[in-house]
Every structure is written in C-alpha cells, then in structure tokens.
Amino acid sequence: MSEHRRKPPQPPGGGRAAARRGPSGSSSGRRAAPRGTTGSSAGSYRSDSDGGDSHGPDPYGSGGEERPYSGRADARRQRNQGSRRRAAEPARGSRRSAPGRGRTGPPARKRFIDYPRAGKYGWQRWVPSWKLVSALFVGFFGSMVAVAGIGYAMVGVPNVDKTATAENNVYYWADNTPMVATGGETNRQIVDLSQIPKAMQHAVVSQENKTFYTDSGIDPKGIARAVFNMARGGETQGGSTITQQYVKNAMLADQSQTLSRKFKEIFVSIKVGATVKKDDIMAGYLNSAYYGRNAYGIQAAARAYFNKDAVDLNQGECAFLAAMLKGATYYDPAGSVSIDPSATPQANSQRALHQMQDTLDKMVEYGYLSPTDRAKFRTLPKWQNPRSNTRLGGQIGYLVDLAKGYLINNTDITADDLQRGGYSIYTTFDKKKVQKLESVVKKYRKKYLDPKKYPKYDTYVQFGAASVNPETGAIVAVYGGQDATKHFTNNADVTGAQVGSTFKPFVLAAAMKWGVRDPEGPAEQAQDERTIASPKSLYSGRNGYKVKDYRGDVWKDDKGNEWRQTNDDEQSYGSPPDYRITLREAMRWSVNSPFVQLGMDVGLDKVKESALDAGLLKQNLTGTHSPSFSIGISDPSAIRMAGAYATFAASGKQRDPFSVTKVTSKDGQVFEHKDVAKQAFTEQVADNVTDVLKTVVEKGTGTHSQLPGREVAGKTGTTDGNKSAWFVGYTPQLSTAVSMFRLDDNEKNKERKFLEMYNTGRQPKVHGASFPSWIWHDYMIDALKGMPKAKFPKPESIGEVLNDLPSPTPTPSATETQEASPTPSPSPSPSKHQGRPSPSPTTTCSGWSWKCGPTDGGTGGITPQPTGSTSASPSPTPTSTSKGRGGSGTLFGGPGG
C-alpha cells in the first residue's frame, strides 16, 4: 500500500485479526489476559510508543471497547502500523492528528540550525526565521571583524627607501653580443617634504584626492568598484586615494592585480592612515610615484622634464607633473608611439595641456591658487629632451624603443615588468647593417645639406629608413633620426609623411588578385564577374585626365565637382590622340592617371584590402574613398613599407615585422618568437608585381638603385608639394624603405607641419629618385655583401589585356627614343627631374609641348608652353578647392613618382 495513502479504519470487531481470534477475543495458542484486569488483555505491553494513551480507548475498536492484544507479536505489529500511519500523514499535508487520536510518537529532537524549518510545510519550510537570519549576520560580521583585525595586525607600514630594487634589462644584437644594459635602473632621489613645493602638494590633492587631509586613507566606494572589476575579470583599477597609491607604489615586490593583493593593500592603507602623519604620506607618495622617463619621485621628474630641482618648480610645472601621474605613456609631450601608435607627440601634448589646465582650475576652486596666478599658465611649460642616458645615443635608443614596444604589444610582458628589469632581450637588429645605414645617411646629409648656409631650404630635413628580411619578417636595421637623445621620434616607426607613388604596387596587386569590375554589373561583384588585369593592360596617361567610376561616368565628389588627375611633372604619357600606356610603362615612369583610374575600376575597397594584406596597418590608411587614395596619400611607416614590399619579395607570403626573437629571465625563457606567415597573394600575383617593379629599376625612375649583378625591384615616390620623397626596393634577401621629408619640430603644440623641399640640398626638386634612391643604393651594396646573387622567380602570365583597342592614329611606341621623332625636343634638365625620363615623343609635335593635347578629357585650360621648354607647365585651372586631393587643396595634383 502506498505510504501516501491513509490506511482505512478497521471494520467493527477488529478486522481479520479479530476474526482469527474468534468471538471470545482470544486466539488459540496465545496467553489469555490475567484475571482481574479491567483494561486490555495486552495492556501490560502497551506504551506511549504504541501510538496512543495506555488508558485511552482503542480508536480502532468497536463501540469504544478496548481491543485486547494476544501477545508480544501483536504488540509489535501494532507499533509498526502506528509508525507507518505517522510517516504517511506529513506527506498528505495534514497539520494535526485526526480527532480522537493521541500522540503518534516521541517529541521531535531540536536541531542546532532549524533549516529547513520543522513544523512548516510547502514553501514556508524554506523561509529562514528571523532568529536564523540575525545569527548569520552577527556571525558573518564578527568573522569579518576578526579577519580584519588579524590582517591589520599582520601588515606593516612600507618604507619607500627600500623600494628601489629594480634591475637592468640587457639587450642583445642579432649575433647575441650585448647591445646595451638599460631600462631597469631606478632613477630616484628622496627629498624632504620641505623641498617639495606646496604647489605640487596642492596639485595632486586637487586632481586626485581632495579629501586627503580628512579621510581615513581609503575610499570604500573605490575599493568596492576595483574589487568587483577584478573579480569579474574586467579592467583593473588602483586605489583612489593618495594613501592607497602611496602604498601601491611602495609595495613593488608584488604588483600583481589580484584580490589577495588588493585586500593586503587595503589593510596596509588603513594602518598607514591610522598611524602615519599626512605630511609623511604626502612626502612618501611624491617620492615614490612614477612620472615617466624612468623618473621615480618628484626630484627625478623635475630633472627629467625641466632639468631643475623640485624646490624650484613653479605652479604650472607642478600641474604638468601632476598630469604625468595619470600615465606618462599618454601624457608625455615627447610621445610614446613605440608603445602605442596613438601616443603621438601631438596627441600627448593635447592630453597633457588639458589635464594641466584642469588641475590648475581645481586648485583655484579649492583655494590653493589665485585666479591671477592661474592666468599665467595657459600653455605647456618648456620641457626638455626625454633621453639623457648617453648609452641610448645614436640609433640605440630607437632600437630599444622598438624592442620594448614589440614586447608590450605582442607578449604578456608589461611596461611595469620591463621597468623592474631582470630580462635578457635578444633582438633582430644586425649591428653592421644598423651602423652602415646610419653612416650612409650621415654622408649625404653632410655632403648636400647645410642648414646654417641655407636655412630656408635645408632646415628641418629628416630621414627614416628600415630594412626587413622577407624570409622571416625580422627587422634587421633602422634609421630613426640623427640621435635618439636629441631627436626622440623614431622616423622608421612613424613619420606622418605620405608615401606617394610607392603605393601604386598595391593597386596593381589588387587588379591582378580581384580584377576590374564589369561596367554593367553592381558595385559589389563576385570574383567570377570580374576580369583579372594583365600588366599589358592599357590606360590613359593623359595629364588632367577626367577620372571615371567603373561604369564610365565622370567621377564627382559630394559637391558635384569633377576630378581631373594630373601627373607629377604635369606631362602626358603615351601616344596621342588617346595617350594610352600599359600599366608596366605607367609604373616605370610613375604616371598617376592610369593607376587612379585602375583603382576606380577595381574598387577602392579592394585597393585598401590589398594594402592591408601586404602588411600595412589600417590606422595609416587615409582617404580610402577618394580617387587619390591609389597614388599614396596614406602615411605608413618605413618599417611597414619595407615589410609590405617584402611580401612581394617572398612570392606573396606576408609576415609582420618583428624585432625580438626571445626573452629570458632568472626563471628561464619568458618569450620566443614564432614564425607566422600567411599567403596574402598567390605566387602568380606577387611575382608579376615584382616583375613590373624590376622594370622601374632597370629602365625607369629607379635606375639609381641598380645593384651590380643583382636583380632589384622597387618604386620611387614623391608627394604633392614636394613635401616627402621615398624609395622602397628589395632583392630576394632584403627589403628596404627610405624616406625623406621636412618637418618643423618646433611646432610641438600644433599640427605637424610638413614643408616643401624645393631647392633642398641644392636640388630644384627632391624626387624619390634622388636622395632616397642614393641612400638605398649605398646601404644595400654593403648590406648584401657575402650573400648569393639570388634571382626572382620567373612570373607566370596573368590576366587579360584591358582596353586593347586600336589607336585611331597610329604613333610610335612610348618606348621609342626621341631620335625617332621628326621634331625632337630637348630632354628635361637632370637637376629638375632627378633622373626622370622624358615623356614619349609623337610624330606631330614635341613631347614637351602642350599644343597637341586633345580637348576630350582636356587639359583643363592649360596654357601651351613653347616647344623645348623645360619649365613645368602651369597647373590646370581647378574646378574645385575641395581639400584632400593629394594635399594641394584642389581637384588637381596628388602624389607622384
């Protein structure tokens, strides 16, 4: 019978057991009740445990008559039946016994914790009583007090004098010989609070902890927020009070962001707040804080930024140094682009100025500074060069910065880890190549540039260069500037200088990889709807060419202005009347109009994707929706350009440039570089790009870069306004990029201002074929010594010849010599074009005369020049002054070759 069903009452007479006993109420073989009893015949065997009162009526008897037991067996059965009935009743939800019943068992034994609650049923059993809740709260609170008391008693007050225990990091050349030991030394000098200006104390209080002089040393809300963030794996946060930050700075032995360390920091902060004077806490904090530039403490910071003692700092300088406490990586005006590309000198200067002004305003608000004195500090104070360590002079500082930046951005090693030191860092830099690259740049700078004699033209000239191994991606050499202790921006890693026509190979690669779009199809087309372009494809080389979209309609900007693309020297290339030229020839002479139109036919999104696939970074690509995007208005670094061209040298395998091979510490190996390569382009595409770029060096604008007995591929680049010039070239074993530009470094708080290079170095105009090519040539001859004279793979034929229509007026080939022309014209002056060849002549007029230009597509109102003139033709009449077209501010122009 189910235990959840009540056993039905027995019928009168006691049921089947009574029937077996017979009418007399006794059973054969069982002992009768003793004479003289008035109760049950088995009364002597009944007890409270039988389920009823020993003298009460039998609830299962008839007519109130007690039921006699016939022996011990019956008593046991009766007890068992009573137990089963009691067990079944709670399951049925009964709250009390049936009428007429007695107790069904002994009273329930009391539990220490009454949960689930006895005597309650359903959901009420799971609701804790107020007694239980109160007890738990008191117990938890008491435990926390006990733990806090123990923790408070166990921690000690930190001593800032004992925290300067950092070690050096040792950097090694690629051949495992030591380069420099630096980076872990602690530059700190403890000074008394009397030597720290009140303005500095007020600046940190105003900006970081306005209740410092009245609080207990901790901020409960800040602590809860930090603990919550760390517990859920989010962004870690430090202490929000000066006391907590002082404790954190002084606990250098353990800088991990864990809950246990956070609790330890809290206990120490409470003890410090209760036992240490506020002035001592302030002195300890300002003497232990990190201000950037390897400066710990206010005295070291004053020397690092202003070359003065802390006691001599004025209010503006104090507010400036308070801003550095927010994180020098993003507030030091010198910049930290090797760690984060967004930490440029300009961006950091703006952040530092804003933070400094905010601090000064709060000092006025809290009564620490008068409005009159505050008005004296509206700009950043004059700060000095961040590198004072002479061991980091020359190129060493740039190499160390590159290695540090690579580790911070690509490994688990943090900037704080590197500052504490103890690492052996093995770099990819080849000592001989670095020294050779630096010496070549110095040679040409000394030979051609004289800022004192020609200040108008030769000042602010800068160079940047990088060399990458195509087989591994290792950066083997860089030139970052004249001296890392004097010029602190690494020109190999970031410049902001446009790359000009060195961008054109990415357009050609996109046309070979994805193909041009069907004019009848939608803007987004699948691969099978496109036509792969051959290097023999023909495009217009006309100067002032009207750029069209892929459907053939003249492209217009948002304001409805047409785009007319000019070439670098404002000459038309190809044979009239349509001036068609092959893509190979257009690359050879660095003609703009064919690649601008090719980019429109392929799609600028595919051109962008091609550049990214080769290894350029997205943040360095600008104007991706403008036709001039295809001719290099972006500003990648020399390292990235060398790495991207290395992708072509490696037959399409792309590897990100890297500068560290491995890192070890006293605990063993910490990091080791793993080679990761992806097939960015097929070998067919990459090898055809290389074959076209070989033409540039063999008989185009890059002839100054020819290396005896070696195959070289490369591209020159010159930007609009002659503000930067590039040469990027490679052999199968080495890819190198060289840039040259003029940048006014004195305008620290303004936008970067690039200056024109007309007459710079006694050259009427600086091209990629001049200084950059010369430097590349001399460096590569030495860098490749001892290496085999390897050859590039022979490319397979690719694509279809686009626009292969017969010319309405046959003319001599664009590659014919001028002697074939009935009316030859003089070649341009070498001093003006720096190796640029003369445009192809025609049978009807001089290649240097604009009188032959057809009106279709027009020259935009170009004034004809006398035949044989070597001066540049006037710019076409602009149809718009829309900004962003090659930097000229008009619809004409754009980077050239």
Image (cartoon, rainbow, N blue to C red):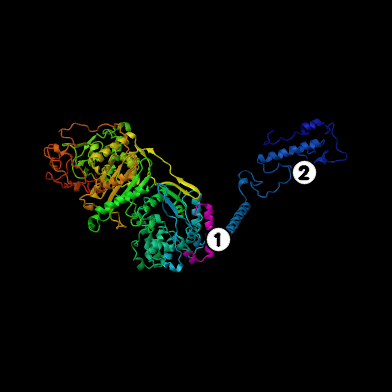
Q: Which quadrant does the N terminus fall into? A: top right
Please tell me whether residue 864 is drawn above or below residue 749 in the rendered image. Answer: above
Q: Position of residue 668 (x, y in %)?
A: 49, 47
Question: Which disc number belongs to residue 48?
Answer: 2
Mark 2 falls on what kind of element? helix
Q: Position of residue 858 (x, y in %)?
A: 17, 41
Q: Are marks 2 and 1 in contact (CB under 8 Å)?
A: no
Q: Which quadrant does the C terminus fall into? A: top left
Q: CA distance from mark 2 to mark 1?
A: 67 Å
Q: Earlier in the sequence, mark 2 or mark 1?
A: 2
Circle 2 or circle 1, nearest the eye: 1
Please tell me whether residue 166 is drawn above or below residue 477 in the rendered image. Answer: below
What's under tag 2, amino acid-wise? Answer: Asp
What's under tag 1, amino acid-wise? Answer: Gly
Can you see residue 463?
no
Q: Which residues are magenta?
A: 255-283
- In the displayed orientation, state which residue is furthest to the right: 35
Q: Observer-nearest residue: 437 or 536? A: 437
Q: Observer-nearest residue: 157 or 491? A: 491
Q: Quadrant of residue 52?
A: top right
- Image side of residue 129 versus residue 716, left or right: right
Question: Which disc number belongs to residue 834?
Answer: none
Can you see residue 399?
yes
Which residue occupies 52% across, 52% down? 259
Q: How many marks?
A: 2
Which residue occupies 80% across, 30% down? 20
* Residue 263 magenta: yes
Q: Position of residue 704 (x, y in %)?
A: 25, 44
Residue named by callout 1: 156
